[in-house]
Amino acid sequence: MRLIIDTDTAGDDVFSLMLALTRPGVNVEAITIAHGNVGFAQHAENALTTLEVCGRAGEVPVHLGATRPLTRAPLSASYVFGADGMSDSGFPPAAQRTAKGAAPEEIVRRIMAAPGEITLIAQAPLTNLALAVALEPRIAQACRHLWIMGGTDNGIGNVTPAAEYNFYVDPEAAKIVLAAGFDVSIVTWTLTLQDGLFTLDQLEELEALDTPKSLFFTAVNRTSLAFAQQTQGLGGSLHPDLLTCALALDEGLIRAADRCVVDVETQGELSRGYLSVSHPILPDVELADPDLVRKAPNARVIKAVDRAGLFAAMRAALA
Ligand code: RIB
Ligand code: CA
Protein backbone atom coordinates (compact mmCIF):
# COMPACT_ATOMS: atom_id res chain seq x y z
CA MET A 1 0.00 0.00 0.00
CA ARG A 2 1.30 3.46 -0.97
CA LEU A 3 0.36 6.27 1.41
CA ILE A 4 0.60 10.01 1.88
CA ILE A 5 -0.43 11.30 5.30
CA ASP A 6 -1.45 14.94 5.73
CA THR A 7 -1.14 15.84 9.40
CA ASP A 8 -1.05 18.57 12.04
CA THR A 9 1.24 16.30 14.03
CA ALA A 10 0.42 16.36 17.73
CA GLY A 11 -1.02 13.80 20.10
CA ASP A 12 -3.10 11.30 18.18
CA ASP A 13 -1.62 12.32 14.82
CA VAL A 14 1.65 10.86 16.13
CA PHE A 15 0.02 7.50 16.84
CA SER A 16 -1.52 7.36 13.38
CA LEU A 17 1.95 7.91 11.89
CA MET A 18 3.39 5.21 14.15
CA LEU A 19 0.79 2.72 12.99
CA ALA A 20 1.51 3.36 9.31
CA LEU A 21 5.29 3.59 9.68
CA THR A 22 5.57 0.25 11.44
CA ARG A 23 3.08 -1.78 9.36
CA PRO A 24 4.76 -4.29 7.03
CA GLY A 25 3.81 -3.75 3.40
CA VAL A 26 2.86 -0.11 3.90
CA ASN A 27 4.99 2.47 2.14
CA VAL A 28 4.51 5.95 3.61
CA GLU A 29 5.84 7.93 0.65
CA ALA A 30 5.46 11.40 2.15
CA ILE A 31 4.20 13.16 5.24
CA THR A 32 2.71 16.59 4.55
CA ILE A 33 2.29 19.16 7.27
CA ALA A 34 -0.71 21.41 7.80
CA HIS A 35 -1.55 24.10 10.35
CA GLY A 36 -3.79 22.95 13.18
CA ASN A 37 -3.27 21.52 16.63
CA VAL A 38 -0.25 23.54 17.86
CA GLY A 39 2.41 25.77 16.27
CA PHE A 40 2.95 25.02 12.59
CA ALA A 41 6.71 24.41 12.81
CA GLN A 42 6.16 22.16 15.81
CA HIS A 43 4.01 19.80 13.70
CA ALA A 44 7.00 19.16 11.45
CA GLU A 45 9.30 18.62 14.44
CA ASN A 46 6.83 16.13 15.88
CA ALA A 47 6.59 14.19 12.61
CA LEU A 48 10.40 14.07 12.36
CA THR A 49 10.68 12.86 15.96
CA THR A 50 8.09 10.17 15.25
CA LEU A 51 10.04 8.94 12.23
CA GLU A 52 13.11 8.62 14.44
CA VAL A 53 11.30 6.73 17.20
CA CYS A 54 9.91 4.34 14.58
CA GLY A 55 13.39 3.69 13.20
CA ARG A 56 12.49 5.38 9.89
CA ALA A 57 14.64 8.53 10.10
CA GLY A 58 15.78 9.72 6.68
CA GLU A 59 13.40 7.37 4.83
CA VAL A 60 10.22 9.46 4.52
CA PRO A 61 10.22 13.09 3.34
CA VAL A 62 8.31 15.62 5.43
CA HIS A 63 6.93 18.53 3.39
CA LEU A 64 5.63 21.79 4.82
CA GLY A 65 2.23 23.04 3.67
CA ALA A 66 -0.36 25.65 4.55
CA THR A 67 0.38 27.67 7.66
CA ARG A 68 -3.21 28.90 7.97
CA PRO A 69 -6.75 28.13 6.76
CA LEU A 70 -7.88 29.35 3.31
CA THR A 71 -9.70 32.43 4.60
CA ARG A 72 -9.74 32.32 8.39
CA ALA A 73 -7.34 32.69 11.30
CA PRO A 74 -5.56 29.55 12.57
CA LEU A 75 -6.91 27.94 15.74
CA SER A 76 -4.75 26.06 18.23
CA ALA A 77 -5.76 22.97 20.22
CA SER A 78 -2.75 23.11 22.55
CA TYR A 79 -5.17 22.94 25.49
CA VAL A 80 -5.64 19.28 24.50
CA PHE A 81 -2.08 18.26 23.57
CA GLY A 82 0.30 20.62 25.43
CA ALA A 83 2.17 23.55 23.91
CA ASP A 84 4.46 21.25 21.88
CA GLY A 85 1.67 18.83 20.98
CA MET A 86 3.65 16.08 22.72
CA SER A 87 2.46 16.62 26.32
CA ASP A 88 5.41 19.01 26.81
CA SER A 89 7.78 16.05 26.86
CA GLY A 90 10.85 18.06 25.80
CA PHE A 91 12.01 15.66 23.07
CA PRO A 92 15.30 16.77 21.45
CA PRO A 93 15.11 17.86 17.79
CA ALA A 94 15.47 15.03 15.28
CA ALA A 95 18.44 14.91 12.93
CA GLN A 96 16.25 14.70 9.81
CA ARG A 97 15.03 18.04 8.49
CA THR A 98 12.05 18.90 6.28
CA ALA A 99 12.24 18.26 2.54
CA LYS A 100 12.04 20.72 -0.36
CA GLY A 101 8.69 21.02 -2.09
CA ALA A 102 5.49 22.48 -0.68
CA ALA A 103 2.86 20.02 0.54
CA PRO A 104 0.09 20.81 -2.02
CA GLU A 105 2.52 20.57 -4.94
CA GLU A 106 3.98 17.32 -3.56
CA ILE A 107 0.53 15.81 -3.13
CA VAL A 108 -0.29 16.65 -6.75
CA ARG A 109 3.07 15.52 -8.13
CA ARG A 110 3.03 12.18 -6.37
CA ILE A 111 -0.62 11.31 -7.09
CA MET A 112 -0.44 12.31 -10.75
CA ALA A 113 2.77 10.32 -11.21
CA ALA A 114 1.01 7.13 -10.07
CA PRO A 115 -2.70 7.27 -11.00
CA GLY A 116 -4.82 4.87 -8.95
CA GLU A 117 -1.94 3.94 -6.66
CA ILE A 118 -1.78 6.36 -3.75
CA THR A 119 -4.08 6.43 -0.75
CA LEU A 120 -4.30 9.76 1.09
CA ILE A 121 -5.01 10.02 4.80
CA ALA A 122 -6.12 13.52 5.82
CA GLN A 123 -6.02 13.97 9.58
CA ALA A 124 -5.72 17.77 9.81
CA PRO A 125 -7.74 20.76 8.62
CA LEU A 126 -8.11 20.15 4.86
CA THR A 127 -6.26 23.24 3.62
CA ASN A 128 -3.38 21.40 1.91
CA LEU A 129 -5.80 19.13 0.07
CA ALA A 130 -8.01 22.01 -1.05
CA LEU A 131 -4.93 23.81 -2.40
CA ALA A 132 -3.85 20.62 -4.15
CA VAL A 133 -7.29 20.29 -5.78
CA ALA A 134 -7.05 23.91 -6.95
CA LEU A 135 -3.64 23.18 -8.51
CA GLU A 136 -4.78 19.97 -10.20
CA PRO A 137 -8.46 18.92 -9.95
CA ARG A 138 -7.68 15.55 -11.59
CA ILE A 139 -6.03 14.33 -8.38
CA ALA A 140 -9.51 13.44 -7.13
CA GLN A 141 -9.84 10.72 -9.78
CA ALA A 142 -6.16 9.78 -9.71
CA CYS A 143 -6.07 9.21 -5.94
CA ARG A 144 -6.76 5.58 -5.01
CA HIS A 145 -8.81 6.50 -1.94
CA LEU A 146 -9.07 9.45 0.44
CA TRP A 147 -9.58 8.87 4.15
CA ILE A 148 -10.68 11.94 6.10
CA MET A 149 -10.81 12.36 9.86
CA GLY A 150 -13.34 15.10 10.36
CA GLY A 151 -16.88 16.21 11.00
CA THR A 152 -19.63 14.69 13.05
CA ASP A 153 -22.33 12.17 12.10
CA ASN A 154 -25.54 13.68 13.43
CA GLY A 155 -23.77 14.00 16.76
CA ILE A 156 -21.97 16.48 18.97
CA GLY A 157 -18.73 18.21 17.99
CA ASN A 158 -15.57 18.88 19.95
CA VAL A 159 -15.27 22.62 19.25
CA THR A 160 -18.93 23.60 19.13
CA PRO A 161 -22.03 21.44 19.54
CA ALA A 162 -22.21 21.45 15.72
CA ALA A 163 -18.61 21.04 14.64
CA GLU A 164 -15.53 18.88 14.93
CA TYR A 165 -12.10 20.61 14.99
CA ASN A 166 -10.68 19.77 11.53
CA PHE A 167 -13.84 20.93 9.76
CA TYR A 168 -14.45 23.88 12.11
CA VAL A 169 -10.96 25.29 11.53
CA ASP A 170 -11.16 25.33 7.72
CA PRO A 171 -14.74 24.65 6.57
CA GLU A 172 -14.12 26.21 3.16
CA ALA A 173 -11.32 23.72 2.52
CA ALA A 174 -13.45 20.81 3.71
CA LYS A 175 -16.27 21.84 1.37
CA ILE A 176 -13.89 22.02 -1.61
CA VAL A 177 -12.42 18.59 -0.89
CA LEU A 178 -15.78 16.88 -0.39
CA ALA A 179 -17.05 18.31 -3.67
CA ALA A 180 -13.91 17.42 -5.63
CA GLY A 181 -14.94 13.90 -6.61
CA PHE A 182 -12.57 11.78 -4.50
CA ASP A 183 -13.49 8.22 -3.61
CA VAL A 184 -13.70 9.12 0.06
CA SER A 185 -14.33 7.56 3.47
CA ILE A 186 -14.99 9.70 6.52
CA VAL A 187 -14.16 8.87 10.13
CA THR A 188 -16.15 11.29 12.24
CA TRP A 189 -15.82 12.57 15.78
CA THR A 190 -19.09 10.75 16.46
CA LEU A 191 -17.47 7.45 15.51
CA THR A 192 -14.44 8.38 17.60
CA LEU A 193 -16.60 8.85 20.70
CA GLN A 194 -18.28 5.51 20.01
CA ASP A 195 -15.32 3.31 19.03
CA GLY A 196 -12.08 5.31 19.31
CA LEU A 197 -11.46 5.22 23.06
CA PHE A 198 -8.60 3.31 24.69
CA THR A 199 -9.54 2.48 28.27
CA LEU A 200 -7.19 2.97 31.23
CA ASP A 201 -6.62 -0.79 31.31
CA GLN A 202 -5.69 -0.80 27.64
CA LEU A 203 -3.34 2.16 28.13
CA GLU A 204 -1.67 0.30 31.00
CA GLU A 205 -1.25 -2.72 28.75
CA LEU A 206 0.45 -0.57 26.12
CA GLU A 207 2.78 1.01 28.67
CA ALA A 208 3.63 -2.42 30.08
CA LEU A 209 5.07 -3.42 26.71
CA ASP A 210 7.98 -1.31 27.94
CA THR A 211 9.49 -0.73 24.50
CA PRO A 212 10.86 2.63 23.28
CA LYS A 213 7.76 3.02 21.11
CA SER A 214 5.30 2.16 23.90
CA LEU A 215 7.01 4.53 26.34
CA PHE A 216 6.95 7.24 23.65
CA PHE A 217 3.23 6.59 23.12
CA THR A 218 2.55 6.86 26.84
CA ALA A 219 4.51 10.11 27.17
CA VAL A 220 2.86 11.77 24.17
CA ASN A 221 -0.62 10.64 25.25
CA ARG A 222 -0.39 12.04 28.80
CA THR A 223 -1.96 15.48 28.29
CA SER A 224 -4.82 14.43 26.02
CA LEU A 225 -5.60 11.57 28.41
CA ALA A 226 -5.81 14.05 31.30
CA PHE A 227 -7.99 16.34 29.16
CA ALA A 228 -10.33 13.47 28.27
CA GLN A 229 -10.65 12.44 31.91
CA GLN A 230 -10.94 15.84 33.52
CA THR A 231 -12.83 17.85 30.90
CA GLN A 232 -14.78 15.24 28.98
CA GLY A 233 -15.35 12.82 31.86
CA LEU A 234 -14.08 9.84 29.87
CA GLY A 235 -12.40 6.70 31.19
CA GLY A 236 -9.51 6.76 28.75
CA SER A 237 -8.12 8.62 25.74
CA LEU A 238 -9.66 9.25 22.32
CA HIS A 239 -7.90 8.34 19.06
CA PRO A 240 -9.56 9.82 15.96
CA ASP A 241 -6.48 9.92 13.71
CA LEU A 242 -5.23 6.51 14.80
CA LEU A 243 -8.70 5.12 14.12
CA THR A 244 -8.67 6.63 10.62
CA CYS A 245 -5.26 5.21 9.80
CA ALA A 246 -6.12 1.77 11.21
CA LEU A 247 -9.16 1.52 8.93
CA ALA A 248 -7.19 2.76 5.93
CA LEU A 249 -4.60 0.04 6.52
CA ASP A 250 -7.14 -2.70 7.21
CA GLU A 251 -10.72 -2.30 5.99
CA GLY A 252 -11.49 -5.58 7.73
CA LEU A 253 -11.85 -3.52 10.91
CA ILE A 254 -14.97 -1.80 9.51
CA ARG A 255 -18.14 -3.25 11.05
CA ALA A 256 -20.67 -0.88 9.43
CA ALA A 257 -20.59 1.93 6.89
CA ASP A 258 -23.14 3.82 4.77
CA ARG A 259 -22.97 5.69 1.51
CA CYS A 260 -24.18 9.19 2.38
CA VAL A 261 -24.73 12.64 0.98
CA VAL A 262 -22.33 14.90 2.87
CA ASP A 263 -21.58 18.61 2.76
CA VAL A 264 -20.04 21.21 5.05
CA GLU A 265 -21.64 24.38 6.41
CA THR A 266 -19.43 27.41 5.85
CA GLN A 267 -21.90 30.21 6.59
CA GLY A 268 -23.85 29.26 9.70
CA GLU A 269 -23.69 31.54 12.71
CA LEU A 270 -23.94 28.56 15.08
CA SER A 271 -22.98 25.81 12.68
CA ARG A 272 -19.64 26.80 11.12
CA GLY A 273 -17.92 23.56 10.03
CA TYR A 274 -20.99 21.37 10.58
CA LEU A 275 -20.88 18.19 8.48
CA SER A 276 -24.34 17.45 7.10
CA VAL A 277 -24.73 13.66 6.77
CA SER A 278 -27.84 12.20 5.15
CA HIS A 279 -29.76 9.58 7.14
CA PRO A 280 -32.28 6.89 6.10
CA ILE A 281 -34.84 8.14 8.63
CA LEU A 282 -35.23 11.38 6.65
CA PRO A 283 -37.85 11.56 3.90
CA ASP A 284 -36.79 12.21 0.31
CA VAL A 285 -35.75 15.84 0.40
CA GLU A 286 -38.05 16.79 -2.49
CA LEU A 287 -40.99 15.35 -0.60
CA ALA A 288 -40.12 17.44 2.44
CA ASP A 289 -39.48 20.58 0.39
CA PRO A 290 -39.84 20.72 -3.41
CA ASP A 291 -37.16 23.42 -3.46
CA LEU A 292 -34.55 20.96 -2.20
CA VAL A 293 -32.55 18.99 -4.78
CA ARG A 294 -31.91 15.27 -4.42
CA LYS A 295 -28.17 14.48 -4.53
CA ALA A 296 -26.27 11.26 -5.04
CA PRO A 297 -24.19 9.89 -2.14
CA ASN A 298 -20.68 11.32 -2.31
CA ALA A 299 -18.93 9.66 0.65
CA ARG A 300 -18.75 6.50 2.71
CA VAL A 301 -19.32 7.35 6.36
CA ILE A 302 -17.94 4.76 8.77
CA LYS A 303 -20.52 3.81 11.39
CA ALA A 304 -18.90 1.11 13.54
CA VAL A 305 -15.51 -0.58 13.87
CA ASP A 306 -13.92 -3.60 15.51
CA ARG A 307 -12.67 -2.01 18.74
CA ALA A 308 -10.63 -5.01 19.82
CA GLY A 309 -9.02 -5.12 16.40
CA LEU A 310 -8.17 -1.43 16.62
CA PHE A 311 -6.42 -1.92 19.94
CA ALA A 312 -4.61 -5.02 18.72
CA ALA A 313 -3.29 -3.04 15.74
CA MET A 314 -1.80 -0.36 18.00
CA ARG A 315 -0.43 -2.92 20.41
CA ALA A 316 1.38 -4.64 17.54
CA ALA A 317 2.77 -1.29 16.33
CA LEU A 318 4.26 -0.53 19.75
CA ALA A 319 5.73 -3.97 20.51
O1 RIB B 1 -11.19 16.58 16.10
C1 RIB B 1 -10.16 15.65 16.08
C2 RIB B 1 -9.06 16.11 15.17
O2 RIB B 1 -8.56 17.35 15.62
C3 RIB B 1 -7.87 15.20 15.13
O3 RIB B 1 -7.31 15.21 13.84
C4 RIB B 1 -6.95 15.75 16.20
O4 RIB B 1 -5.63 15.89 15.73
C5 RIB B 1 -7.61 17.05 16.63
O5 RIB B 1 -6.89 18.14 16.92
CA1 CA C 1 -4.98 15.69 13.50
Image: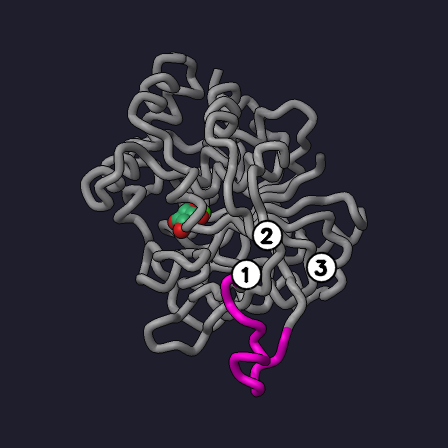
Judge depth for marks 3 and 2 and give the one in front.
Answer: 2
- Secondary structure at badge 1 equals loop
| Quarter-of-image position of residue 90 | top left
The colouring scheme, among rainbow, by chain, secondary structure or one colour, is: one colour
**Mark 1: amino acid:** Pro
What's the distance in space between the residues labelled 3 and 2, CA to CA?
Answer: 20 Å
- Percent from the top left, x then y, of residue 268? 39, 77
| Start-end of magenta stretch | 279-294
Check disc 3 and give the amino acid type: Ala
Q: Name the residue under label 1.
A: 280
Q: Is residue 161 left or right of residue 267?
A: left
Q: Is mark 2 on a helix, strand or loop?
A: strand
Residue at image coords 70%, 56%: 108
Asked if disc 1 and disc 3 are in contact, CB closer than 8 Å, the reply is no
The amino acid at mark 2 is: Asp
* Viewer-nearest residue: 272 or 15: 272
